[in-house]
Structures are given as C-alpha cells and as structure tokens.
Amino acid sequence: MKRFCLFLFCFLASCATPESQLASGLQRAGLGKNTSECMADRMVDRLSLTQLLKLRSLGSLSEDRPRSAAEFMRKVRALRDPEILSVTTSSLAVCGLGL
C-alpha cells in the first residue's frame, strides 16, 4: 500500500503544468502567490522550456533568496538572457504593479 501511495504521489507530481511549476519557483524566489501565478501564465507562452527552467531554478537558491521584487530582478539579470529579462520585466509590470 505504501508503494502504491508513493507511486500515486510521484505520478500526480509529474502531471503538474509548466505554469504551476514556474509559479511555485517564483514564489520560492520571493514573489507573492497571485503575482507568481499571473506571471507564470504570461511567461509560459513567451519563453522556451530551457528559459523557464532557468527561471524556476531561482527559487532553489535558499541561502541567497531574494526578499523583494527588486532583488528578484537582480537575480534575473544575472542569468544574462535578454529575452528572459524582457519577458520577466513586462510580466512583473503587468502582474505585480498592475500596469
């Protein structure tokens, strides 16, 4: 029974959408839940899978976790990908600032 539950959990975790995975990563990176979900919806349509994985990985930097949107954007700039920076900036403006 334990193996079945473990299998079921792993199966359901693998079914998570790219949007939800990115939103979780953005939340771990210090952004709010609503902002993260809104940004993830926009970014999934505009960035490649490789770029999305780079962004999602920002949330795994626990010892150097950004505490504000400005710190988060510094981390995004450090990725040195102009397209990621452009899409993230516009998504944060629309979702986080309501522009």
Image: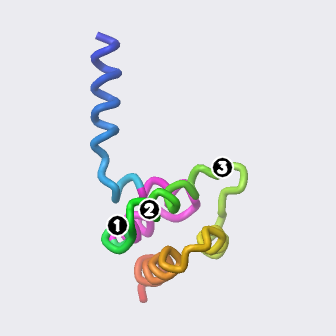
Amino acid type for the residue under numbered disc 1: Val
Residue count near mark 2 (Cα–Cα under 10 Å), binned few <14, some 14–19, many ≥20: many
**Most foreground residue, 43 or 28:** 43
Image coordinates of residue 25 in percent, x first then y, are 49, 55
- Residue at 43 percent across and 78 percent down: it is 91
> Is disc 1 placed on a helix, strand or loop?
helix
The residue at which mark 1 appears reads as 44
Pick whichever of labels 1 and 2 is earlier in the sequence. Answer: 1
Pick whichever of labels 2 and 3 is earlier in the sequence. Answer: 2
Amino acid type for the residue under numbered disc 2: Leu
Which numbered circle lies on residue 62? 3
The residue at which mark 2 appears reads as 52
Image coordinates of residue 69 in percent, x first then y, are 59, 73
> Is disc 3 placed on a helix, strand or loop?
helix
Image coordinates of residue 2 in percent, x first then y, are 34, 12
For the residues marked 1 and 2, what is the alpha-carbon distance in whole angstroms?
A: 7 Å
